[in-house]
Image (tube, rainbow, N blue to C red):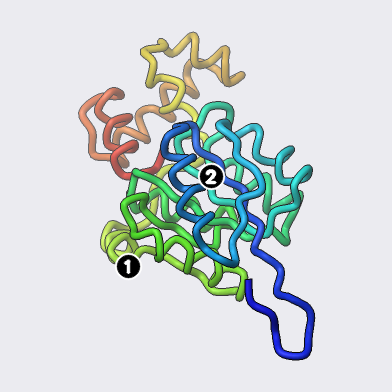
Amino acid sequence: MTEASGGPPARNVRVLLADDQSMVREALATLLGLEDDIEVVAQVARGDEVLAAARAYAPDVALLDIEMPGLTGIEAAAQLRKALPDIRIVIVTTFGRPGYLRRAMESGAEAFLVKDAPASQLADAVRRVLRGERVIDPTLAAAALADGADPLTARERDVLRAVADGSVNAEVARSLLLSEGTVRNYLSTAIQKTGARNRAEAVRIAREKGWL
């Protein structure tokens, strides 16, 4: 840690890591810990543990994976943005999908990187978001622009997620407090928007695009 001339020593950047894969999480913690000005103060394995850990450890930056139990990283990011708006959010994921990028930015994330990015790029992103910058993987940004906007409504996404495990319309209607006719209508519209032939293909396409 270096000291500013004539002033107090610079404070380390406090980082919260959230990733359900322990080896990946520990590897990221180790790599970031090698930086002189970065300190990993907390690690969690579930999305629904992020907010409590952030309140307990007061990180400056939260690094969130997308695919986690409890809540996704995008959902956890939205919680953080609402409850603790001063925390900067970096999404770090294996899934470099354009739809994920859009949803991450909408949820309040300042950066979006894929996990195979160099460790120096991740550390640089942590520092840059604290300066108020946005950091987005350039290849993913180009793909997002080329791919167009997510055409699905929130309710259409809810219904597609509900049918992804094979649930029939009646089960989906009960779980989402909708009528079966409404579920059928949402499914039909989602199938048309994704260009799919059936519900299973609509789910697959929406996942590949990062819309779910």
User: Under tag 2, what secondary structure?
Assistant: helix
Between marks 2 and 1, how big is the CA–CA gap?
A: 20 Å
Which residue is painted at 45% across and 53% down in the image?
A: 31
Depth check, front residue: 205 or 173:
205
Q: Position of residue 52 (x, y in %)?
A: 74, 38
Q: Image check: 176 left or right of 26?
A: right
| Kind of residue at badge 1 | Pro
Assign the N terminus to one quadrant of the image. Answer: bottom right
Q: Are marks 2 and 1 in contact (CB under 8 Å)?
A: no
Mark linked to residue 174:
none
* Residue at numbered disc 2: 74
> Which corner quadrant of the image does residue 189 belong to?
top left
| 113 over 176 or under it: above or below | below
| 71 over 145 or under it: above or below | above
* Extreme-left residue of the structure: 197
Tell which circle, 2 or 1, labels the residue nearer the N-terminal end.
2
Q: Position of residue 28 (x, y in %)?
A: 46, 48
Which residue is painted at 33% across and 38% down in the image?
A: 206
Depth check, front residue: 141 or 171:
141
Few, some or many residues within 10 Å of mark 1 (<14, 14–19, 20+): few
* Residue at numbered disc 1: 138
Few, some or many residues within 10 Å of mark 2 (<14, 14–19, 20+): many
User: Under tag 1, what secondary structure?
Assistant: helix
Q: Position of residue 32 (x, y in %)?
A: 50, 56
> Which corner quadrant of the image does residue 144 belong to?
bottom left
| Kind of residue at badge 2 | Ile
Depth check, front residue: 202 or 132:
132
Which residue is painted at 42% across and 34% down in the image?
A: 23
Which residue is painted at 61% across and 19% down in the image?
A: 177
Depth check, front residue: 155 or 73:
73
Assign the C terminus to one quadrant of the image. Answer: top left
